[in-house]
Image (cartoon, rainbow, N blue to C red):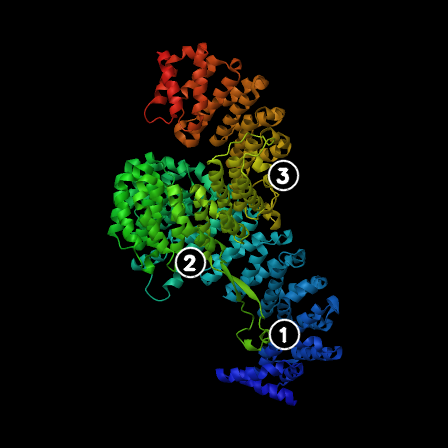
Amino acid sequence: MSEDAAKMAQLLSALTHPNTEAIREAEVALKPLLKDARSVPALVEVLKARGTQPDAVRHVAAVVLRKRIGGHYAKFDAPTKTALKTEILSVLANEPERTVRNGAVGVAATICRLECSSGDAGGAAWPELFQFIAAAASDANPDARELAFLLLSEMTETIGLHLKPQFPSMATLFANALTDTEVKVQNSSVKALGQLLSYLADEKEVENFAALVPAIINVAAACQKRSDEDTVSVTLDVLYDLAYSPSSAVAVHLPATIQFCLGCVSDSNLEMGVRDSAALVIATLAESKPKMFGKDDSLLSSVIETLFNLIENSTESAAGALFESNPAWREDLKEDGGAGDDDDDDDNFDSPTETSMAQGTLDMLACELPKKYIFNPVVSRCVTRLTSPHAHHRKAGIACLGVIAEGCAEPLREHLPDVMPHVFAAAGDADAQVRECACFALGQISEHCQPEILSYSSQILPIVFALLDDTTVAVQATSCYVLEMFCERLEPEGVRPLLDPLVRKLAAMLEGTTKRSVQEMAVAALAATAVAAEEEFTPYVAGVAALMTKLMALTDEKMYTLRGRALECMGHMAIAVGRDAFRPYFSSTMQCACEGLTFDSTDLHEFAYAVFANLAKVMGEEFSPVLGELVPHLVTVIGADEGQLEQAEEDEKGQFGALDDSDDEDEGGQYVLHVRTALLEAKKGAITAIGEMAAHTGASFVPYLEETMAVLKKAANNWHPLIKVEVAEALPSMVVPSVAAHHGGEITWEKGDISGQSPMSPHTAAVVSAVLAELIALMKDDDKETAGKACEGIQSVIELCGPHALSPVASDCLENTHALLTKTAPCQRGEEMYGDIPDDDDDHDSFMTSVCDLVGAYGRVMGSHFVQYLPQFLPPVCSFAKSSRPPSDRSMSMGCLGELAQELEGGISEYWQSVFFPAILAGLADADDNVKRNAAFCTGVCCEGLGENIASDYPQLLQAISPLFSVDPTAGDSSAACIDNAAAGVSRMIMASPGNVPMPQVLPVLLKALPLKNDMTENETVYKCLLGLLQMNQPDAIANKAEFRRIFAEAIAEGSKVDDETKEKLKLALPALN
């Protein structure tokens, strides 16, 4: 052995001993030697010294050689490189010791990468290595065959970048290895091929290997049977990466992939982490290929059945998903015997369980798959299990109903009459877990099925009220959650019957329990009750404020959330009772919120920002004195970086990391971004707060506009959708202070008039221009919610400031809006990206409502100027009205047509026969009341705008609208509104062309439907029509004087929702009816 090699071996030997000081000294001595290119042949010599050097030393030589060869390889001449490569191939071919051989694999892979990267030899770099691999792959010795795939595994990136011409021959190698008789050869080929598939997942070249996916799954399934979890995990990682592949050659293996993952999910012999990874693949396929997944009935059925089985066969709480991130809940569960007291408790809570895994997967399926595929199979199973004599079946049934409430909100809203009796029955179940899950389901339905769920208030509130006394802490806390979710949107009359006992009960619970989870939920329920009761909560403010004041003084870190909830409750009470009733508590609430900002708790900061937002809204100008202190703080928070770069961990970094090449430079290595999600949430809250301050403090905010706009512009480019959505919501508020300062709070503008001087001051025009520029950019964001909020923001600004605001950017606005309507915008390109089946099965995208509302706003602001764009906009709007679309889409489309007809009036005449008339007839005949309602509105405004021009179509229109008067108004709000809009539609028809309405038949039907029950915005239309008929002494009106008298008397009665001006007109008309 040469002198250099001997010296090297001595130092390397020190690295193999468990003496930290000796290792450090050896590393210090080695570093200068390794900077010299002569270290490479010395290391190779040690690597080859079988028999004279210990295997451990030779293995270390291989590891160090791999780390350092990159810095020296380019210095060698061609003969030296060839000799070096020959030596390494010789070691690979002849080395019997596995660890040393594996070390040499790494060296070979590194040399191959260097050869390919140099570009000297193109795709043929080091052909001898590939000849070696091909020969080894077909060798009789299984160790040699395994070695071939260990080499390929180490060369993934090199193969993917430089060796594409060799893919077909490699595919053959892999195909043979996957059916090898030796397990270790199969496993090494799965790892190598899996890494290559993951690398190529987004590339067309993945198709060279796609046909091998079933073989990989077969190997993994065999490994699963013998509990080889490593290979199963590797396979699941690959299948996850392939889930997003756009290749149809990969997509055809979706059924096989899901069946394998389902087997893993169900296998109790596998570690929970592995099972959870399998569940993640299923959920990801639901996200990336929802239509392909959903259309496979039997596959979807087996997935759903498996998830139900997991939940019903587990002893865990199935409502736990609601609180799993809440420390107070964990603590109370522990005290109640839900968990042990050992140190691993927190880990146990953070780890997936069978129930959390099943619920999380079902939630993803409900959110991602088209509702027509997922809703009925889940709900039918829920109902079947809810009628079971076995409590664990009933638990699963009611829990799963709650899980799908968010994702399947639209069909669930339609089927509430069928579903709610089962929920109410479960709430009274003898089994505590069933009752708890019933609360969970009630809460989820209350949160996601608004406003339809509100019609059940008389049944829900007494049930929840009773559950507040339940003996189980979990049921108590969950019933508070139901109250919070349910009451947020409830009107005062809904909560009035139980308001007093409810407030007293919640207050007593708050004072009588030591369970933090119950305390937190009780405070949240009190806050929601206040919001529902509005001014009727005023008598309770003093008592509740006293309770909250105690909680707002808590300083124990464990109590921060409770303190924050109390602060939140004060903000909600302010919203409920208004400025005057809350003024005595304003100062102390603000003091507590500001004090919370001095605590090292992002949770408390979030609560503080939320209360600032609410109090700015309530106190208005009275909030202005604190702007000077708060705005700079909020600007700093919004401008802060919520992520930080940290040096990435590299392979073998821990093993002799000090000997890496990068150690010789000051800033070597790779860095990764670590995101502090708590700061992200705080930043979101700060943006909300600053937006509300701008919207409600008037001209006082003008001095802060410049710095606020600057930081919002920066935040608009944030990487996270959460932040961009909030920015899009806050931006329009920046216009409000300028309008307050320069226009007295209102700009007077004329529809479509851009001929004269702009009504906007230069300052307002500058703010509007800056705000719209950001919102237009956000319309093109790749996140749907952000794009939708941007549309809402643009609508808000142009409706406030008029056509002069829109004119400079109209082209961009219209172009972006059209792209969203035609599903060609950046946020809508996911389908083709992930290789799903393109068809018209999409569910309603809630953000599209904002897009259609913006189209209506263009009509409102541009007036007749928008008529020229109808040929482009009407077809995509009408595409949402097709019978194959979900009801929300059809309703949205009909509503948009109605708005355009109302704003453009005679401008739509060219499109009456081809677009509006057929759409109205189809809408009036629709099965859904909301579609019928909007079609009735559209009927009226079209007749109003087109007048006598469409009188010949009146008979058909009246015949189509007639059945709407037979709808049952007690069936729900949308049913009542349907009749109201039909009445308003007919009223408009009468006013537009009374001679073409057969009054003897029509008027009695119209009068019978009055007064309006739900849509009070149409009162003016209806009573204008009736008063007009009386003024004309229309014979049929005179003949029906008694009905007119009844309607007018009800309209002017105390508690009527008819506006005062109309009431006065009706009072004046009443005497003539006697």
Q: Residues within 10 Å of mark 1 (few under 14, many from 20)?
A: many
Question: With respect to residue 888, does 227 lie above or below?
Answer: below
**Closest to the observer, 666 or 231:** 666
Looking at the image, residue 800 lies above or below residue 6: above
> Mark 2: which secondary structure?
loop
| Disc number placed over residue 392 in the picture, else none | none
First-in-chain label (2 vs 3): 2
Q: Are marks 2 and 3 in contact (CB under 8 Å)?
A: no
Q: Which mark is residue 105?
A: 1
**Disc 3: CA contacts within 10 A as few (<14), some (14-19) or many (>=20):** few
Amino acid type of the residue tagged 2 in the rendering? Thr
Reading the image, the residue beneath label 3 is 811
Q: Residue at x 62, y 48 (%)?
A: 832
Quadrant of the snapshot with the C terminus: top left
- What is the spatial separation of the Cα atoms under label 2 and label 3, in whole angstroms? 53 Å
Q: Position of residue 436 (x, y in %)?
A: 34, 49
Residue at 35% x, 46% y: name it: 571
| Residue type, mark 3 in image | Ser
Which residue does the numbered mark 2 point to in the structure image?
353
For the residue pair 969 and 647, the one nearer the viewer reads as 647
Question: Percent from the top left, x then y, of residue 505?
Answer: 26, 45
The mark that comes first in sequence, 1 or 3, is 1
Regarding residue 434, the answer to whether it shows in the image is no
